[in-house]
Image (spheres, helix red, strand yellow):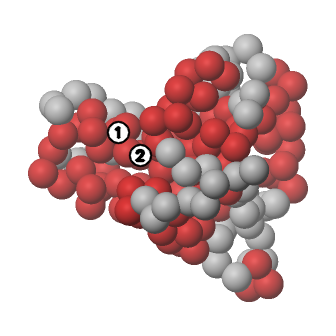
Amino acid sequence: MMSPQRHDPARHSLRKLLCTSLLVIAPAADALAAGYVPSAVEAFILETVLADEVRMLEQGGQTVLLAPADASAPGATAAAATVRHQFAAFYRGERTTARAIPHMAVVIAMTALRLEQPGQCRTDHRTCAEAIRRAGPTRDDTDGLRTVVARFQAAGLDMSAIESSGARPTD
């Protein structure tokens, strides 16, 4: 028998962050001419990646997503918000010149497909980060790549930033 859950402020904050992210990423579906609504797991993986990037930048390290946004340690959270909005625009089918956005969207969707227990990426960033590491690299997953690219193209997402670079999104 399950015991009643106590109110956990950290878990509540994570759920609120996830809900807010989904609202930014997925405006009303009927208003979308083109677009892709990421699953809750994909949205939480994005939030986990952004949290890791903010932490890395604040510790003086290099980042993939925040560096192009000219982020500095004091502005890491604001840069993450900018990147979050870039993802939302991409998911709505808007054109992006930032190759990192569609690239990471593909990697995130592929990672979500590879998770042994997708539920581990719904409420806790640390658990999700561990699940992502266990899922392993997406580099050699050609079936997953085909699946995700086809899904994104069917949703009308702009993949030109990836296609023009000639690199596979999993590189």
The type of residue carrying mark 2 is Leu
Residue 60 horizontal/vertical position (percent): 16, 31
The disc placed on residue 72 is none
Left of 6 or right of it: where is 167?
Answer: right
Q: Residue at x 46, y 65 (%)?
A: 7
The reply to whether callout 1 and callout 2 are in contact (CB within 8 Å) is yes
Q: Nearer the viewer, residue 158 or 31?
A: 31
Circle 1 SS class: helix
Q: Residue at x 66, y 22 (%)?
A: 135
The residue wearing badge 2 is 50
Residue 96 horizontal/vertical position (percent): 54, 56
The residue wearing badge 1 is 53
Alpha carbons under labels 1 and 2: distance apart: 5 Å
With respect to residue 115, does 90 lie above or below?
Answer: below
Q: Residue at x 72, y 63 (%)?
A: 37
Residue 51 horizontal/vertical position (percent): 38, 45
Q: Quadrant of residue 136?
A: top right
Q: Is residue 106 visible?
A: no
With respect to residue 88, does 110 lie above or below?
Answer: above
